Image (cartoon, rainbow, N blue to C red):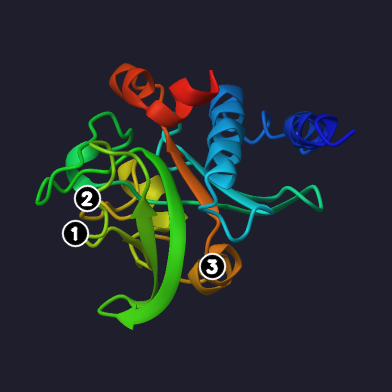
Amino acid sequence: MVVAAPAVAVSAAAMLYEQLSLDSLGLSKEAYEFALQGQEQLAKEGKLRNENILSIVDFSLPSTKKRLFVIDISSGQLLFNSLVSHGRNSGKEMATSFSNSPESYKTSLGFYVTGGTYRGKHGYSLRLEGEESGINDNAMERAIVMHAASYVNEVLGRKQGYIGRSLGCPALPVKLHKKIISTIQNGSCLFMYSPDTSYLTRSKLLQHTA
């Protein structure tokens, strides 16, 4: 019974993809399945303080689409579905180029554990700890955080074909950022996904769970 429990939990979480109609919202099934795998591994390693919340940014979607999904695994609810920015050097409408390097102004893919909040030059912000060596572990050094940005809005997206871009941070709409950050802070899993072959073949978290 003890051995079967994790499998049952994962199965229930996997079923949420259909139950919440996440496909109709554009979330890649691969992104969702990978997110569950990585979250499970991070939990096994004792890195998560909040295993109920899973956040996924699906960069297979254009920036004009709501590509941040915040899911409460325990209650089976989609808490937020929001616009989110990518780095200015990662692409315009689509994020296609990624980097872990300082001053690259690109997004870093992979798994993060959310940290604490603080008030900085962008106001209420959330620290992010990159968990993948060589892929996103420079996040703290690069000051890759979640914060609000006025350029993350639908009007701008419709006008120019893409929303504004950051220096690599996953920036959020001003009206939603406080609620989202307050929900996912302090030890939950954030997965930034792309069907990027380089990332998918290099990620030890995904290889570990394959």
**Inter-mark Cα distance, 3 to 1:** 26 Å
Give the tally of numbered discs.
3
Residue 138 numbered mark, or none: 2
Q: Residue at x 34, y 43 (%)?
A: 162
Up-down: is 121 above or below 200? below
Camera sees residue 69: no
List the residue tagged with mark 1: 141
Camera sees residue 83: yes
User: Callout 2: helix, strand or loop?
Assistant: loop
**Quadrant of residue 48 within the rendered picture:** bottom right
Which quarter of the figure is the N terminus placed in?
A: top right
User: Callout 1: helix, strand or loop?
Assistant: loop
Determine contact: label 2, label 1, CB under 8 Å.
yes
User: Callout 3: helix, strand or loop?
Assistant: loop
Label 1 is placed on what type of residue?
A: Glu
Label 3 is placed on what type of residue?
A: Leu
- Callout 3 environment at 10 Å: few (<14), some (14 to 19), or many (20+)? few
Q: Position of residue 105 (x, y in %)?
A: 16, 48
List the residue tagged with mark 3: 176
Please name which of the two marks, 3 or 1, marks the residue nearer to the observer.
1
**Quadrant of residue 120 within the rendered picture:** bottom left
**Inter-mark Cα distance, 2 to 3:** 26 Å
Up-down: is 120 above or below 61? below
Q: Residue at x 42, y 58 (%)?
A: 153
Of the two numbered discs 2 and 3 on the same chain, state the one appearing first in sequence.
2
Q: Position of residue 131 (x, y in %)?
A: 37, 45
Q: Is residue 120 left or right of residue 172?
A: left
- Callout 2 environment at 10 Å: few (<14), some (14 to 19), or many (20+)? many
